[in-house]
Amino acid sequence: MNIKLELEALQPSMVAMRRDFHSHPELGFQEFRTSKILGDHLEQLGFEVERNVGITGIIGYLRGGKPGKTVMIRADIDALPIFETTGASYASSTPGVMHACGHDGHATIAAHVATVFAKNRNELSGTFKFVFQPAEEVVGGASAMLEQKTDLMDDVDAVVGLHLWNDKPVGWVGVRAGAVMAAADSFTITIKGKGGHAASPHQAIDPVVVAAHLITALQTLVSRETNPTNTAVVTIASLKAGEGASNIIPESAELRGTLRTFESELRSRLTDRIKEMTVTLSSAFGATGSIDWVDGPPPVVNDSSLTSLFEQVARDVNGSVSTADQTMGGEDVAEFLARKPGVFFFVGSNDAATGRDKAHHHPGFDFDDERALPLAAELLAKTALEFSKI
């Protein structure tokens, strides 16, 4: 079995599948077309397949010809609510929806690793559980799969997954032992005041003014209440109030934001403080503040010994491997890694020469699929094989 050569031979198929997925993006828990293609692909390879796990998730089982560990290979499949501006021939055919984070690539990579494994199943040790997870972007797909299939992780010995990384060029591979991506919680704050005429603010309770003070005050939770040697982010990403009229003070305002942390104690304390500050500051202005909190995935934490094993694989495959920077971005692969040891690594995917170097979640996002996909697939396949022998 020569994984590198077999995957290189599949490069045209990988590019075609990725571009097909890119042309037909689907939002979280709506990935019905994507899910069907992946499920059909695995069944044609002879996998035992479970469909509609966590609404649109797919699980495929392949048992090797030799005894060994059970390795979960995880990929995400959902797109984002963004209008694409790449102008590519394979650009999104669904207005307002696009693959702007590489999930079309992740699904393709795992599907083609499955192709090579199925062809060589008698030479494989252990069992390989391919998990195609929905709704990573809205944070909840992993939890939905785990809630529906409560024994999903029971037989898993190790987890492996990857993220194509457009911050880095093709040829760069990175990983980090321990926490590499942050916990990602989200919240919606509603401030209820008293509407009125903009010329008579004394007769109203202006929720916009309250929101402005609250936005500023929340930043002090990081700048003045968090140890400078720790890391946290509080971002208010959306503020909505009124209907656009310049002479009306609205009844209410809505703020949407996120909290990002690595340490559990800090996460808990800042959660409590955001909730407390919302109520007390609103009250100080005569308004009422309430908050709807959504606990997101925990930090992505890589097992140190498995990270060392991945680094050996990466050096053999790529010649080098870098220590990835911690990022405050979240990823709900963390839900799987919180239950079983594993590694989530990064593969550079940008190509500035062809303009495929925009940041993740940018409307012009694209990546060098011709070169990034075979390298990422080889790393994923060889890492999974090494994990099955531990």
Image (cartoon, grey):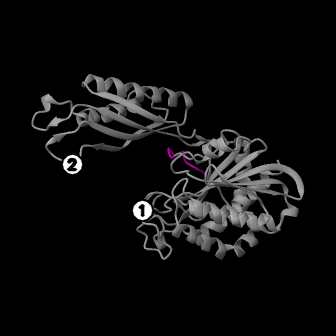
Marker count (numbered):
2
Cβ atoms at labels 1 and 2 below 8 Å apart = no
Percent position (x, y) of residue 139? 53, 46
Q: Which labelled disc corresponds to residue 96? A: 1
Residue 247 x, y percent position in the rendering: 13, 43
Specify which label sits upstream in the sequence, 1 or 2.
Answer: 1
- Residue 55 lies within the magenta run: no
Q: Residue 171: x, y in percent?
A: 60, 64
Give the residues drawn in magenta, as a range. 322-329
Q: Judge by depth and name the residue closer to the eye, 34 or 314.
A: 34
Quadrant of residue 279 in the image? top left
Q: Is disc 1 surrounded by few (<14), some (14 to 19) or many (20+) residues within 10 Å? A: few
User: What residue do we see at 76% from left, 45% from top?
Assistant: 156
Most common secondary structure along the magenta stretch? loop
Viewed as shown, does residue 277 lie left or right of 114? left
Instruction: Give the left or right position of residue 380, taking residue 83 as reference.
Output: right
- Residue 244's disc is 2
Q: Amino acid at mark 1?
A: Gly
Q: CA distance from mark 1 to mark 2?
A: 24 Å
**Few, some or many residues within 10 Å of mark 2 (<14, 14–19, 20+):** few
Specify the quadrant that holds the N terminus: bottom right
- Magenta includes 324? yes
**Along the line of sight, which residue is nearer the eye, 83 or 226?**
83
- Which residue corresponds to the image point at 45% horizontal and 63% vertical from the top-left? 358
Q: Is residue 278 visible?
A: yes
